[in-house]
Amino acid sequence: MENIEKLKGQVVEDINKAKDIKSLEDIRVAVLGKKGSITELMKGLASLSVEEKKEMGKNLNLLKTEVEAVLETKKSELEEAELNAKLNNERIDVTLPIRPETQGRIHPVSKIYEEVVSIFGQMGFAVAEGPDIEDTFHNFTALNMPDNHPARQMHDTFYLPKEKNGSQDMDDSYVIRTHTSPVQIRTMQKQQPPIRIIAPGRTYRSDYDATHTPMFHQVEGLVIDKNITMAHLKGCLYDFVKTFFELDEIPVRYRPSFFPFTEPSAEMDIGCLKTKSEIKIGAGNDWLEILGCGMVHPNVLRAGGIDPEVYQGFAFGVGMDRLAMLKYGIPDLRTFFESDVRWLKNYGFAPLDESSMTNGLSNNGGQTR
Ligand code: DAH
């Protein structure tokens, strides 16, 4: 009995001294394992008399239960201590700065794309799309530019090789679209008025200098309904340029022009101040051409399957790269498409600064760039 008390005192002392789960487990094995001290004592019961066995067995069982209980308590204590240490080490310091600034940048054309879509989106325009490889019917004929129309040459068109079937029909040939206007026709063919769409996308012409590249971006606009007039066109485009350049007011003027697909046709200018080194939009006595527009020609409505006696509409076409150059002061268009990361780092936009009418279009006029 004395021995048992002694053993118990020793074991409990060892348990209390254990520093971690591993050493506690070692103690458990040394005491209760197959060759543990208590286990050995239990094995020794066999050689005792019945009376002794009864007494000793009872005491040993008691000892075992008590040791197990002490082990269990210590184990939970150690586990809790370990968890607390872990939580302490892995604590997140919410006052630390956010992750390092992202490396990627949004291209100015993508930025303009988002801005244009959010402005017209809020005016109730949907975004329409058409193919880059376009047939000459949609690119020219349906837009009131029949075969041999001089405007076809003006477009410096990239024609695709003719189909092998040798068809002589001009409308069977393909071009990479010279403008986004064919999306007008595709939309009319699919949808009856009222129509209110913009069609942003890539366009192609054989041209190359500081303000022209073989691939560039346009956004087309088309509104068709009953009783649409030039006043609607003017109101819509005024709102667009004002919002786009983030100004409270902007001087605008319309000059008569010619496009085969509109009658009358006009070009819209915005007021600006031109100095040797920069163009300031919205002030001064100079004018800058910004877009082409007009009332949709009756022949175009007819080609799209819409009765011009019932419906009228207006259309416009804007160069998106040019908008980017003007708004963000980028001097040479060719640099847009050279894929130079140094250029993109300078002129690109932070990926998470999404353009929207509620959060701000360019986020403080490009200050986040
Ligand atoms: N498609 C014309 C171009 O590429 C731009 C344009 C002008 C589109 C007037 C229009 C418009 O819809 O009404 O030069």
Image (cartoon, helix red, strand yellow):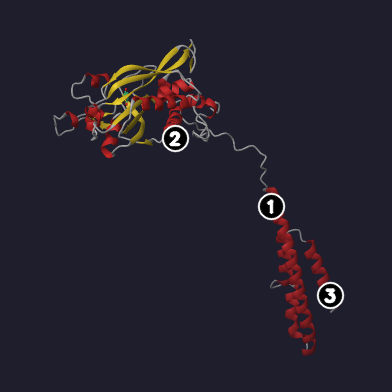
| Camera sees residue 178 | no
Out of 32 and 253, give the one closest to the viewer: 253
Amino acid found under the numbered disc labelled 1? Lys
Out of 349 and 281, give the one closest to the viewer: 281
Of labels 1 and 3, the one closer to you? 1
Amino acid found under the numbered disc labelled 3? Glu
Q: Earlier in the sequence, mark 2 or mark 1?
A: 1
Report helix, strand or loop for mark 2. Answer: helix
Bin the neighbour count of mark 3 within 10 Å (Cα to Cα): few under 14, some 14-19, many 20 and up: few
Q: Position of residue 31 (x, y in %)?
A: 74, 70
Residue at 22% from the left image edge and 30% from the top image edge: 137
The answer to whether 109 is drawn above or below residue 4 in the figure is above
Residue at 73% from the left image edge and 57% from the top image edge: 81
Residue at mark 3: 5
Residue 261 lies left or right of residue 10; in this view the side is left
Q: Position of residue 275 (x, y in %)?
A: 49, 10
Q: Earlier in the sequence, mark 2 or mark 3?
A: 3
Residue at mark 1: 86
Bin the neighbour count of mark 1 within 10 Å (Cα to Cα): few under 14, some 14-19, many 20 and up: few
